Image: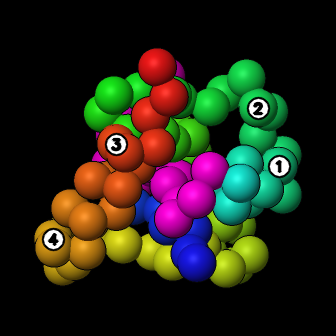
Amino acid sequence: MTVYIDDAVHPWRGERWAHLMADTLPELHAMAAQLGIPRRAFQNRRSGAHYDVPAPLRLQAIALGAQAISRHTDRERVKAVIANARRQYQA
C-alpha cells in the first residue's frame, strides 16, 4: 500500500500546493499526522479524499516515503490514484 503526492502546482495563499492521497484512508491520515497536518485539514470531497500540502512539506512527505506522481509524466497513474481517492469519499 502506498501514499502519493502530486506536483505542487495549485496556487493558494501565496504558495503552491500539492495533494496527498493514499491507497487507504488509514495510510493517508497516518502520513498527514507524520507531517504535522491536523485531521481537520482532511478534504473529504467527491473529487477525492486528500490533504492539501504546501510545496515545502511535499519534500518532507517524499522523504517519509510518499511516492511522487506527476500529471506531466505519470498521467495514467495519477488518474488511477485520483479514481481511488474518489472511491474513498464518505458522504
Q: Are marks 4 and 3 in contact (CB under 8 Å)?
A: no
Q: Residue at x 69, y 61 (%)?
A: 27
Left or right for 80, reference 39: left
Q: Earlier in the sequence, mark 3 or mark 2?
A: 2
C-alpha distance separating marks 1 and 3: 21 Å
Q: Where residue 89 sits in the image (x, y, percent)?
A: 44, 34
Q: What whole-number distance in Å separates the C-alpha atoms at marks 2 and 4?
A: 28 Å
Label 1 with label 2: CB-CB less than 8 Å: yes
The secondary element bearing badge 2 is classed as helix
Amino acid type at circle 2 is Arg
4, 91: nearer the viewer: 91
Residue range highlighted in magenta: 8-25
Say which residue label 1 marks: 33
| Secondary structure under the numbered disc 3 in the rendered image | helix
- Give me the disc on residue 75: 4
Number of the label disc, if any, that sits on residue 39: 2
x 16%, y 73%: residue: 76
Mark 4: few/some/many CA within 10 Å (<14, 14-19, 20+):
few
